[in-house]
Amino acid sequence: MKKEKIQHILLRALPMAAVLAVLVCIAVVLNRTEEEQTESDASRMVYASAEVTAVLADNAQEDFQNAEGRRVGDQELEIRILSGDHKDEIMTVTNYMSALFNVDVDQGDRIIVRIMTDEDGSYYASVFNYDRGIVLGAFLLIFFALLAILGGKKGIGALAGLLLTLGCIWFILIPCLIRGVPAIPVTIGVSAVSAAAGLIFLNGYSKKTLCAVCGCVGGVLTAGIAAAAVGTLSPMNGFNMQEAENLILYGADRGLKVSGLLVCGVLISALGAVMDVALGIASSVWEMKEQNPDASAKSLFRSGMQIGKDAMGTMANTLILAFAGSSLNMLILVQTYDIPFLQLINTDSIALEVVQSVAGSVGILLTVPLVAFISARLMVHGGSRRV
């Protein structure tokens, strides 16, 4: 009996293992670096961690007029390199501090330095920023620990799904976009795989998971279609984004297509919220079916819609407020300069934020009836709980 159970678990894990293996192979192929380019980049500039061993001179003073009391000026620092090819070397650097670029350090502080190497082999270092790696790493570990402790198996599954999604975006989606692969299809594919894998990690193989995955993919597609439609009618696309100029310059010889990146951003930004709504509705409909086995598909659909109405408002608010928070500085500037409404609403940055947030919210709204319908049909006519 125990042996059969182990075999059953292995058989159920086999499809996921095969998918992960394929994703890893794709990521390896996409992220192969040309040797000549790597050597060229490394010969010019590298970043390394360093420790300030002494402050040789400090010519900085507090500036309350323009820098809110931050010290501006310059420092002469003696540093010891802690990583890379120049590890343990002692260097002297000048640390220039302004209101915006302000790395004010004392002896014993850790910083990141940029080491430039000239064609004749000589090199010099400059201060880049504080070394935040330890603090950020500890913060992430605390988050992972809380997720695992408070969430138990579900938390560990959610963490695995999150890491897989981030890995797919960084190692598969972005390299594909850089190489000129059609942006919208590849983003839809990565979103679908990430949603399916994440929900399976969280909830296992079940009809409830299947309903959530179908609804999630449908909701993300709806958000993308809404963004594409508004972008076509506006007209507006990736060329209107703030980073478009740099992307055009970089992608000229790499095949990067900028125009489709607006819709890609909407698809990715809506994915998390849509997954949340989809799984919540599917779980609710499933529990109602468990409590009332004789419930009809129509009554389950109505109940799912009723529950979904609460999720609609909160998730739409979450998405819109997330975009508002990321654009807070821009909103402050808008009000400070008293920009007229007609100019404001037709500014590229504002229009992009509106399209992204509203398109994502449209995806959330239409996810609710889609998941409720699929769940009601499958749970009444689909047979057993597991698949």
Image (cartoon, rainbow, N blue to C red):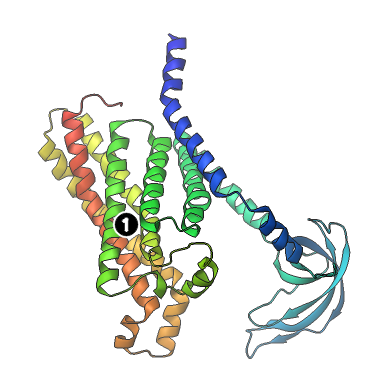
60 on left or right of 9: right
In which quarter of the view is residue 19 placed?
Answer: top left
Q: Residue at x 68, y 53 (%)?
A: 35
Query: In the rendered image, which residue does mark 1 sit on?
Result: 315
Residue 142 visible in this rendered orientation of the protein: yes
Q: Residues within 10 Å of mark 1 (few under 14, many from 20)?
A: some
Q: Position of residue 204 (x, y in %)?
A: 38, 32
Q: Residue at x 27, y 40 (%)?
A: 282
Q: Position of residue 328 (x, y in %)?
A: 44, 74
Residue 111 visible in this rendered orientation of the protein: no
Vertical arrangement, residue 367 with respect to residue 203, above or below: below
151 on left or right of 41: left
Q: Position of residue 248 (x, y in %)?
A: 49, 71
Vertical arrangement, residue 86 with respect to residue 369, above or below: below
Q: Secondary structure at mark 1?
A: helix
Q: Position of residue 218 (x, y in %)?
A: 27, 49
Q: Residue furthest top?
A: 1
The amino acid type, in three-letter code, at marker 1 is Met
Vertical arrangement, residue 57 with respect to residue 78, above or below: below
Q: Residue at x 41, y 45 (%)?
A: 194
111 on left or right of 180: right
For the image, the number of numbered tags is 1
In which quarter of the view is residue 232 placed?
Answer: bottom left
Q: Nearer the viewer, residue 176 or 51?
A: 176
Quarter of the figure that contains the C terminus: top left
Quarter of the figure that contains the N terminus: top left
